[in-house]
Image (spheres, helix red, strand yellow):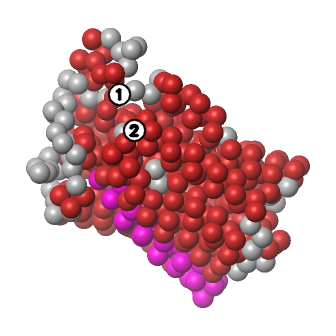
Amino acid sequence: MICALLLAATTINYLDRSTLNVLAKTLQDEIHWSDVEYGDINAAFQIAYAIGFLLLGWLVDRVGTRYGYAIALTFWSLAAAGHALARSAFGFGVARFFLGLGEAGNFPSSVKAVAEWFPRRQRALATGVFMAGTNLGAVLAPLFVPWLATTYGWQATFVVTGLVGLFWIVVWLPVYRRPEQHPQVGAAELALIQSDREEEGPRIRWAALVPHRQTWAIAIVKFLTDPIWWFYLFWSGKIIQEQFHVSLKGLSLPLIVIYALADVGSVFGGWFSSMLIKRGWTVNSARKAAMLFCAVAVVPVIGVHYTTSLWTAVWLMGLAAACHQGFAANVFTLASDMFPRQAVGSVTGLGGMVGAVGGFIFQMAVGRIKTATGSYLIVFVIAASIYLVAVGVMQVISPRCERARVD
């Protein structure tokens, strides 16, 4: 039940942020923004996402998962609907800023809920399941957005997709409690949940997390790899339409395939490391083996630049998106592996903030690289190689992934 709620919220989160990707070419033709301006619009989302990760990671640890998640989802739903008021590149930048600020609360809330509801050996799989919502939301966007936009207009599309989240809150608030407070959790289930849990101590300040190399390992890896996911999320529809001359309605199936594959990668990445742990591997070896596998499998994405086949490009981007999600599921889980439960929301928030700063830089760079070179080749070279760099960074900074001793 908890996984289903987290999956639904993450699906809504990515439906709201993916709507612009589907409509990017349509809005560019209507509002006449440039590639540089489109990159800057996405950069506004990213810098707000960075700020929101820091603030909402703290909020979730402060007020608890139940209320912290509800606050974040209400805010981003209203911001998503607010896109309908934009009439210029600047207006869309403002709307994306507020959307990013609220949407940053999703992952600190979800990761903390997983830490509260699952024993350590099951967390990677649980994380992989709720992260499948990132791809499910990205699939629903091309499935419904073109129809909504052509039938009712792009303004109505943002309103409809934005307000869906308010229905989730009606279910979440009555249902969610910590397991030890939940009336439907029996003694046997509670014993399983708490079977390898450390005793929860007092709240931990951000300043106490910064000196630890485990914090920096997660933060730097997310700084390197998160921008690549944002590139696929915000630019894949535009690339397909530009490179292969696909219509808005024709964009649906290629994007659905890309993010359906990413769904598979999300669950597989979490399952793979959990399976290795069950077979006797250490947490350190299992997580890193899964990350290395994904880092190697993402390399062929560079072929998108060279192919003239739409579906070759779709399968290559789908494989890369799947590898990113499998990689990210294990990075998220390392936060609950290496830190006490009361610090998980803050650590995830810090890592997400740094990853969003990387995304802010990269989004501004993509539009300028495309304008200067006329292609995305340099961007795809970075996307193909950066995960291997990230695995190396994780190994150097945290070679054993041991628990942080946080005061």
Tell me which amino acid carries mark 2. Thr
- Helix, strand or loop for the magenta stretch, by majority: helix
Q: Looking at the image, which residue sits at the far bottom?
A: 372
| Callout 1 secondary element | loop
Q: Nearer the viewer, residue 169 or 92?
A: 169
- Number of callouts: 2
Vertical arrangement, residue 295 with respect to residue 141, above or below? below
Q: Is residue 107 left or right of residue 29?
A: left
Is label 1 in contact with label 2 (beta carbons under 8 Å)? Answer: yes
Magenta-tinted stretch: 347-375
Q: Which mark is residue 134?
A: none
Q: Mark 1 — residue? A: 178
Q: Nearer the viewer, residue 148 or 392?
A: 148
Vertical arrangement, residue 90 with respect to residue 86, above or below? below
Residue drawn at the location 71% of the way across and 60% of the way down = 83
Q: CA distance from mark 1 to mark 2?
A: 9 Å
Determine if residue 265 is in view: no
| Callout 2 secondary element | helix
